[in-house]
Image (cartoon, rainbow, N blue to C red):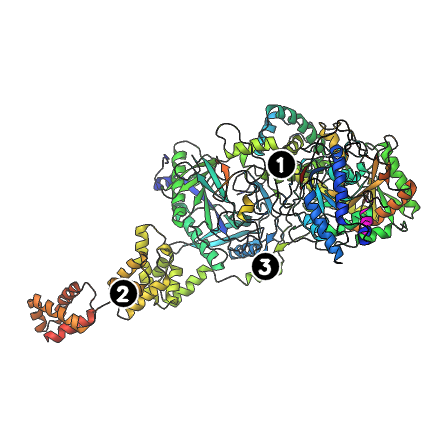
Amino acid sequence: MSTDTLLSFEESLEKFDPAMGLEVHVELNTNTKMFCGCPAVFGGEPNSQVCPTCLGLPGAMPVVNAKAVESAMRIGLALNCEIAEWCRFARKNYFYPDMPKNFQTSQYDEPIAFEGYLDVELEGGEIVRVEIERAHMEEDTGKSLHVGGATGRIHGADHSLVDYNRAGIPLIEIVTKPIMGSREKAPEVAKAYVAQLRELIVALGVSDARMDQGSIRADVNLSLAPVGTGSLGTRTETKNVNSLRSVERAVRYEMQRHAAILDGGGSILQETRHWHEDTGVTTSGRPKSDADDYRYFPEPDLVPVAPSREWVEELKGTLPELPREKRGRLQKEWGFSDLEMRDTVGAGALGLVEETIAAGASPQSARKWWLSELARRANDSGQEIADLGVTPADVAAVQALVDAGSLNDKLARQVFDGLIAGEGTPAEIVAARGLAIVSDDGALGAAVDKAIEANPDVADKIRDGKVAAAGALIGAVMKEMRGQADAGRVRELIIEKLT
Amino acid sequence: MPEIPGSSSPRGTSGRIEISRDEVAHLADLARIDLSDAELEHLAPQLSVILESVASIAEVAADEIPPTSHALPLTNVFRDDVVTPGLTAEQALAMAPASEGQRFSVPRILGEEA
Amino acid sequence: MTDYLRASAADLVAALEAGETTSVALTELFLDRIEAVDSAVHAFLHVDREGALAQAAASDARRAAGAPASVLDGVPIAVKDVLATEGLPTTCGSKILEGWIPPYDATVVTRLKEAGLPILGKTNMDEFAMGSSTEHSAYGPTRNPWDLDRIPGGSGGGSAAAVAAFEAPLAIGTDTGGSIRQPGAVTGTVGVKPTYGGVSRYGLVAMANSLDQAGPVSRTVLDSALLHEVIGGHDPRDSTSIKEPVGALAEAARQGASGDLSGLRVGVIKELGGEGYQAGVEASFRESLDLLVSAGAELVEVSCPSFVHALAAYYLIMPSEASSNLAKFDAMRYGLRVVPDGDPSAEDVMRASRDAGFGDEVKRRIILGTYALSSGYYDAYYGQAQKVRTLISRDFEAAFEKADVLVSPTAPTTAFKLGEKLDDPLAMYLNDLATIPANLAGVPGISLPSGLASEDGLPAGFQVLAPALADDRLYRVGAALETLLEKKWGGPLLAQAPSLDTGPGGRVGRSAPVSRPPYSTTGEMA
């Protein structure tokens, strides 16, 4: 557990200006690895997707995956970057058991894409331009399981077991320039940047873009400088930030932690820190030191990448509609207000709403279910809305039942309970839970008679022409029928019987 | 964010190059070789002699000379994104000093990943 | 009856084609020779009797069916232990890889197998090809068949000695700074470093990737050409492989053997001679130049001023790349694992294993390379060395404007005594003075015997260098010179080598007879 002292967020900002840098690793969804023909898929039997090259066997050599280069360039172009006319791979030398060659084949001072930007929209509608320093190609490492010790964590483990299936999967590392001047919005900017970068990656179709499975991983660099000086302080690099929410929290945490240290006259240790999703704190990792001498040099087993300008132009033509443009178009099509659109995007539900509409629901009903009902449940259970277990097709099916008069909103909520509990399709849940609305006159008539009998004074009022009083009788019938009565038909029956 | 190496030049490229025992120990540490004291004593003067003999190179080529990293100027050598047969897990693990559960077994790992 | 043991590979092919012998008979002949003399020479680290005989039998079956796989189908070969061979130990002369059996073949090995050459075994070498004497092998040195107290050159001393001692008609070597050519020179054999990218490096355990090149080792120029055609050509698994056909090399050798070099301009490199070169080596070189002139060649002196910096550039680039290449030997996935006492971490085990598994020269170069790549030193060392490479390439370009081929002695001296330079790395490095520039520029080179140095009666080598992709010129000029020299000598130079005649008991006893061969074996002994 952390024993870090924190300054309050407000006080931190009174004294210091934050500067952030975000490094996002995107695992590409190519068929094969970066430098060999092994499958680049998630979750095979351990060490079943390996070959001499990705296992780093003596003598084996790398050959670059053309599709990965293409994906890297498309990402670069979508981020408004320059595409290098000539660049090389370089070796980053350091020892680690999950890295088969004990160097990572990466790019160093010659990235494939550089000098770009992403315009990020904040919740209030404000646009912040995040400048991109570079996007470069590299390879992923293997995965270690830590055995012995209590927690499966690295510390206290007895030994480790390594699976190299992931080793060599193509990664694109996207590095921002220092983001300054966002002040109290820094945590929000960080989250919005990663979220909108993720949307862009999804739109490009170059990655599964699942933060929970590590196909997008963010590192957060943060430093503070005395307010108004415009200088850069010593930074820490927080790793393992694997959800959008954590990006925001990690920035906030490090701001407050740095502020407390600096305010107390201390100095920041330049180090790697680890984010703990469960406890919401960072802990010290590894100090930056001479040991970070990676001894980069150009990879002699690979030749330079020199994309022709024709190739670059051709790829520009394949860029999809960018997310922000798409949002504008959809808002118009759906007739959403600015607020409704912002809420939809803010809840991470844009794609879900879009798919729900595509599955047949009206825009307002799709929005209503995702944003009121499902967003609340996701929030209650601390999940991403997409991970609730409810699909856009489910939501459209529920709405279709409502539209057909088979469900009312209250019953529909119970169907969502069933969906989240994994009880089957909406139709199956309606049948199994017996949720369908009763509009059969026989059953309804009996309940209406019972209600009239139990509420003679209300019945009299209606008989006197005060039809508005029918509501009380309808309520009684609904109660009797556990909400499953067709309210419209009940009203008709009451008025028939009493007038 | 990477830092550019070579911001400083090696000491005394024109004069004597002395590589100390401590410096060799540091390099051995970077290279993950557990050199004994005797090896360190033996290596330090040898490395100094070798470095002195190669130091002349620092002044040979002018700034405008481009470096050659590849003897022949090939570019854009790529592979199609098509799966090719690799090794079975059994083959992969056959030469492992230790394995467990179809994984390579390695001693406890000290630090976090770089 | 033909002495197949001493015959050239081309003559063995003729005998096989004529049905005078079989691949099995030839393979057994060489295996028996290995058994007889290798306890003295120690050219082999591993002999694969069973595998070689099986490949030979398959070759005989193909030939009987009228469908040989290549010109060299059935001719046995030895392979330097730096190339991965599926199912056969591959140690690179290092303890750290003792017992490692690769699950795959190097492309060169695949091509040998596809062409039907039975692989006799794996030859000795300086550890990870680091050395010029084969004394840095963790499994003991190879000895020079001309004088068993002397070095056979390095790092490919095993391949050169195997061919010189008639343990194999052909061998594969690798050349990073001269490791094919210099052993060729000091053992009186032929060795070729092809154009960089001409022969696949896939499966060649890299020392310095931007310099390494596999190539043929043989007793005649034509044999090297035949072998070069088998192993050369584009390989999609090596990104630095040249996408061009290997060329008509054997034809160039046959053409050269006619002895006519009219109109050929031969550039003598001013900087590769004089100080540091043994008098007898230089005299032998001059005699060869005279023969080239007599065949119609025109001599021109060329100057390559940057060559004086080649050795320094090489001893920065090579250790830098090597320090990174050898990082993979960390005791985690394969190879030697040394577990120190106590409760060692993975790092502790790496450090201890690398200390125990690597020899002195390897450690020296790893430390040197680590230093040269370190931040603060990169520009001044590795970066500068890469610029010197550019200057050396420019020198070659200028020289090839004036001459069709360039020539020099291959090595400054003849074979020195075992142990003589073992702890003087600088003196050892000087052996590669004349061979290194070709590696830095990627151009091809051949060494062939030019005679015996008068002061010690040991072989000297003649080096021919050609522009990149003009490997055929090496064979044309090499074969012409070989023809002229052999006419002068009345036969091949190796005919003058000591016979290594097997004494009683069937083995050469240099001192005390050895009870078992120094190499490991697969398959039963005949």
- Chain of residue at mark 3: A
Q: What is the secondary structure assignment of the residue under circle 1?
A: loop
| Occupied quadrant, residue A369 | bottom left
Q: Which residues are magenta?
A: C1-13
Sooner in the amino-acid sequence: mark 2 or mark 3: 3
Mark 3 crowd level (few <14, some 14–19, many ≥20, 10 Å Cα) = some
Kind of residue at disc 3: Val
Q: Residues within 10 Å of mark 1 (few under 14, many from 20)?
A: some
State the residue position of label 3: A312
Q: Are marks 2 and 3 on the same chain?
A: yes
Label 2 secondary element = helix
Residue occupied by mark 2: A431
Give residue C108's position: percent from left, percent from top.
69, 48
Mark 2 neighbour density, 10 Å: few (under 14) some (14–19) many (20 or more) = few
Camera-nearest label, 1 or 2: 1
Residue mark closest to the camera, 2 vs 3: 2
User: Looking at this view, is C112 or C289 the one in front?
Assistant: C112
